[in-house]
Amino acid sequence: MGSLEFETPRTAAGREGLAALLSAPAESVVGLDFDGTLAPIVADPEQARAHPGVAPALSALAPRLGAVVVVTGRPAGTAVAYGGFAGVPGLEHLTVLGHYGAERWEARTEEVTAAEPPAGVAAVRAALPGVLERAGARPGTWTEDKGRALAVHTRRAEQPQEALELLRAPLAELAAAHGLMVEPGRMVLELRPPGVDKGAALAGFLAGRPLRTVLYVGDDLGDLPAFDEVERRRAAGAPGLLVCSAAVDGEAPVSALADRADLVVPGPAGVVELLAALGAALGDAR
């Protein structure tokens, strides 16, 4: 095994998870969030693109692992396009779980399969503009329609955190009226069906697979359910490593995630360094 050019996990459980992945990569899975983890956070999510080092690092690492899965709230096809994952040698067994697992893209077929759209989203879509107007949404607030969910962003508004707080209660009321929930994030409130999260998506992906060790990397509150799933597995004796992709450019990391992580890396560039180091170490071990 070659030397690893990143910080050693700060917890015993994290060090155990890393050792298990390096000793038995074929029994291991690397799970990755997209925005803030593989792609830098930008004011316009439609302009988000994966860090240029992501595809090369994954193409070197993925063939040595049992699986690599990207878990995102975005539509699966959008994550594939913005990630540049299609047709990349070495990524033939990559899976992208979009809409928190409601959509699945498999690299071997390059096809997306999807469940039926959730109830309630259409009603919220119709009512949302009026709710935002009555709530006094600040200029710069805008809505991203994800098809199976709707995300209200305040990053472009002046004093974006205050703009976000202004909308918490009215959006929670709207979501509850139509059987949805509100998932907070970094200057965003997402209205989506309950029981649909990255933890459930990760658990569903792992069900029935001979994959013992899980490394999961995320950056925001929406990744906490995936952290919960890895910790549930660790409590049952399966190794795991939790990694936080910390915000850069002066924005503080999400403390709820960073405090629970075994390892904190500096944003997508740090994630690329981690993936590349793992690929190099496993390559040296062959």
Image (spheres, grey):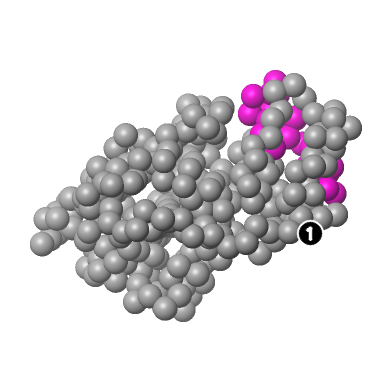
Task: Give the quadrant of the C terminus.
Answer: bottom left
x and y percent of residue 111 in the render?
A: 41, 55
Q: Left or right: 62 with respect to 147?
A: left
Q: Amino acid under label 1?
A: Gly
Q: Left or right: 72 with respect to 270?
A: right
Q: Is residue 8 visible?
A: yes
User: Would residue 282 be counted in the magenta stretch?
Assistant: no
Which residue is painted at 34% across and 58% down in the image? 109
- Vertical side of 27 occupied by 50: above or below: above
Of the pair 47 and 1, the residue shown nearer to us? 47
- Vertical side of 134 occupied by 88: above or below: below
- Vertical side of 140 occupied by 184: above or below: below
x and y percent of residue 23 in the render?
A: 22, 68
x and y percent of residue 11 in the render?
A: 40, 59
Q: Which residue was labeled with disc 1?
A: 179
Residue 19, image quadrant: bottom left
Q: Helix, strand, or loop for circle 1?
A: loop
Q: Main secondary structure of the magenta part?
A: helix
Query: Is the residue marked by circle 1 packed among few (<14), some (14-19), or many (20+) residues within 10 Å?
Result: some
Task: Give the quadrant of the N terminus.
Answer: bottom left
The magenta segment: 152-174
Which residue is painted at 25% across and 42% down in the image? 56
User: Would residue 164 be counted in the magenta stretch?
Assistant: yes
Residue 10, image quadrant: bottom left
